Image (spheres, coloured by chain):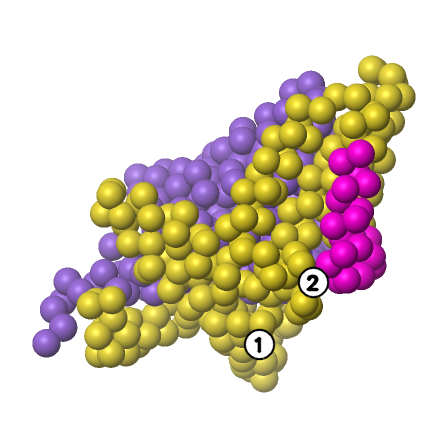
Chain colours: A yellow, B purple
Amino acid sequence: MTAGVFVPGGSLLHCASPGIKLVVLASFAVAISLTNNTASLVIWTLLLAIAWWSSRIGWFRLVQLLRPLWLLLFVLFVFQSLIEGLAAGINTVFIISILIAAAGLVSYTTRTTDMLKVLERALKPISLLGGRPHVIAFAIVFAVRLVPFVTTVGHEVIEARVVRGGSRNPISSFIPMIIRLMRETDTMAEALVARGYERI
Amino acid sequence: MPSAVALAKTRAVVRCVMFAAIIAGLGLFPPIAVPVVAVPITAQTLGVMLAGAILGARNGALSVFIFLCAVGIGFPLLAGGRGGLGMFFAPSAGYLLGWIPGAYFTGFMTRSSNANLPKLVTACLIGGVGVIYFIGIPWMAAVTDLSLLQAAIASVIFVPGDVIKAVLAAGIARAVHRGMPAVLQ
């Protein structure tokens, strides 16, 4: 399971326990949301910049993380500046960017398997309602494993269509693709039960 | 000796898992550019509507939950190869979280539709578009300090694409139910 957004490294942030990182992230998020003056925002930004630098994951990842949002952030900035003044515009854009960057930093420096363990622990309360946290953890890993399977079946269905003289239209291939994948689940369920799945 | 009950339960879990993978797989499809509306349509919300309409309310919502957990713990499964906790702090996070009740409502309304196409389209529109916007718009307004109306206006460009997806999802779901009547148990 190395296909996640995790970037390997040996920095302090990489070595910190994932539980602590998530608690710090949550407190950071609350603190940031309660800030409304630019001066304290600058301090938070500097702290985050130092943390980012110390993790040695590269600044280009910060650009990657925020680039899909630039248009939204720009529109927000214009809106807020016109309605509530320039300071409000800058604050809003900064608060959102800092929050996303901080959460991204935790994801970049925490192994997916460690995150899974934290999630399993966080889901413990659902066992009181009859849910099973380790089944959900298993389901998540199983789902990620099945993504390449889904794309393989998708390509096969499209190719089969083309061979029969049909179009490459992906939409009309959804129906046979989903039916095939759903049929496949019967075999997978039998294989899981045969291996003692119901006893986990 | 595995009992029939254990097999049926396991099958339900595997179907949820498979649908979570289908939603992820739909994110890999190149966004379809619609000529009239300039906004590209990513197929992932189509997957959310399909999850509800094909698996039913509970299992549909569960498969979306599994998918979002995978995104949250760091798998880049959202359209455009995005993933990680940052996605849940973005202004659009409400839409993502809205996928869970969205799939639930789609499934809930599909139950009483009896494979009637207009009713299925309505189910996908209310569950897969209405419910998701109902959570996404106030969330965006709260995060960005915009008014509800402003946040709603910012979302309007996605409506035509979502309506097309709802119609597609209804057609696909009906065909799957016909081809595989046992899937909604």
Nearer to us: label 1 or label 2: 2
- Look at 28% across and 65% down and name the residue there: B11
Q: Residue furthest toward the bottom? A: A163
Find out whether the residues at labels 1 and 2 contact each other: C-beta distance under 8 Å.
Answer: no
Q: How crowded is mark 2: few (under 14 residues within 10 Å), some or many (20 or more)?
A: some
Q: Is residue A51 magenta?
A: yes
* Residue B99 disc label: none
N-term-proximal mark, 1 vs 2: 2
Q: In this rendering, would A126 be left or right of B36?
A: left
Instruction: Residue under label 1, please give it.
Output: A155
Q: Residue furthest toward the top? A: A84
Residue type, numbered disc 2: Ser
Q: On screen, B107 above or below B70?
A: above
Magenta region: which residues? Answer: A43-64
Numbered disc 1: secondary structure? helix
Question: Mark 1 vs mark 2: same chain?
Answer: yes
Query: For the residues marked 1 and 2, what is the alpha-carbon distance in whole angstroms?
Result: 41 Å
* Residue A11 disc label: 2
Q: On screen, A193 above or below B42?
A: below
Task: Report the magenta stretch's main SS.
Answer: helix
- Look at 59% across and 25% down and name the residue there: B138
